[in-house]
C-alpha cells in the first residue's frame, strides 16, 4: 500500500510540474518520469521532445502553493527554480537577485524570470550552502520569498544520482 501511495504522489508531482519544465517546449512534448524520493522531495527525470534526457529535478511543493526545484541538467549545470502562482507572469532574461542561505547573504546573483518562475544558475558555493541550509530567502526587485529547506542535502544527492544515471531509475530488487 505504501508503494502505491508513493507512486500516486510521484505521479501527482509529475503532472504539477509539467508547465515548469523545459522553457519553450510544449508540455505534451515532454516526458516526466518519477525517479525516486528524498524525504519530502520528489526526484523526477525530464526528457525533451526527442525523448533525450534533459535534466533531473528534485522538487517540493509548499502549502502556500509555491514550488522549489533543483534542476541537475545533463550538461552539468545546476539551476534553482522557484515557482509561485501568486507572482504575476513576467518574462525577464536578466533579474538581479540575492540569496540568503544559512544566514549567508549572496548579492548580485544572476537570475531570470519565465512566467511565474524564477531561475538561478547555481555556483558550487551556492550549491554547498544549499546542502547545509535549513532555509532560503530569495529577493529580486519584484519578488521576495522565504522557504524551508528540510532535506536539502538529500535533494541535491537525489538529483545528482538521477543525472548520473541519465534519468533511468535504479532497478527495484
Image (cartoon, rainbow, N blue to C red):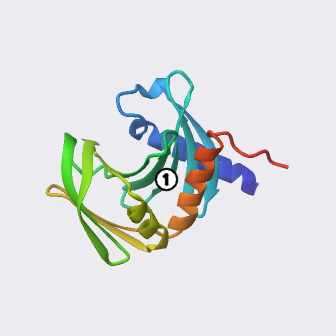
The percent position of residue 141, horizontal first and vertical second, equals 14, 57
Whether residue 170 appears in this view of the structure is: yes
Point out residue 116 in the picture as x, y percentages from the top left corner: 28, 45
12 or 50: nearer the viewer: 50
Q: Nearer the viewer, residue 162 or 66?
A: 162
At numbered mark 1, what does the secondary structure look like: helix, strand or loop? strand
Q: Residue at x 32, y 75 (%)?
A: 104
Which residue lies at the image location 36% right of the left edge and 33% below the top edge? Answer: 23
Q: Is residue 40 visible?
A: no
| Among the 4 quarters of the image, the one containing residue 93 | top left
Residue 94 left/right relative to 28: left
Question: In the image, residue 171 lies at what x, y percent?
Answer: 79, 45
Q: Nearer the viewer, residue 105 or 39?
A: 105
Answer with left or right where residue 73 lies relative to residue 117.
right
The residue depicted at 76 percent of the width and 54 percent of the height is 1
Residue 120 in the image, given as x and y percentages of width and height: 33, 52
Residue at image mark 1: 59
Amino acid at each position: 500500500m505504501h508503494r502505491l501511495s508513493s507512486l500516486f504522489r510521484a505521479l501527482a508531482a509529475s503532472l504539477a510540474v509539467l508547465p515548469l519544465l523545459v522553457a519553450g517546449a510544449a508540455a505534451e512534448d515532454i516526458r516526466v518520469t518519477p525517479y525516486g524520493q528524498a524525504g519530502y522531495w520528489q526526484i523526477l527525470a525530464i526528457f525533451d521532445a526527442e525523448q533525450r534526457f534533459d535534466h533531473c529535478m528534485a522538487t517540493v511543493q509548499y502549502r502556500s502553493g509555491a514550488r522549489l526545484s533543483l534542476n541537475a541538467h545533463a550538461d552539468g549545470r545546476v539551476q534553482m527554480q522557484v515557482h509561485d502562482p501568486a507572482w504575476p507572469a513576467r518574462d525577464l532574461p536578466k533579474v538581479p537577485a540575492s540569496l540568503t542561505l544559512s544566514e549567508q547573504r549572496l548579492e548580485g546573483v544572476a537570475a531570470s524570470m519565465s512566467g511565474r518562475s524564477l531561475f538561478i544558475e547555481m555556483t558550487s558555493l551556492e550549491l554547498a550552502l544549499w546542502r547545509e541550509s535549513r532555509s532560503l530567502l530569495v529577493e529580486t526587485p519584484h519578488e521576495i520569498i522565504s522557504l524551508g529547506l528540510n532535506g536539502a542535502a538529500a535533494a541535491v544527492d537525489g538529483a545528482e544520482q538521477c543525472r548520473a544515471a541519465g534519468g533511468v531509475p535504479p532497478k527495484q530488487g
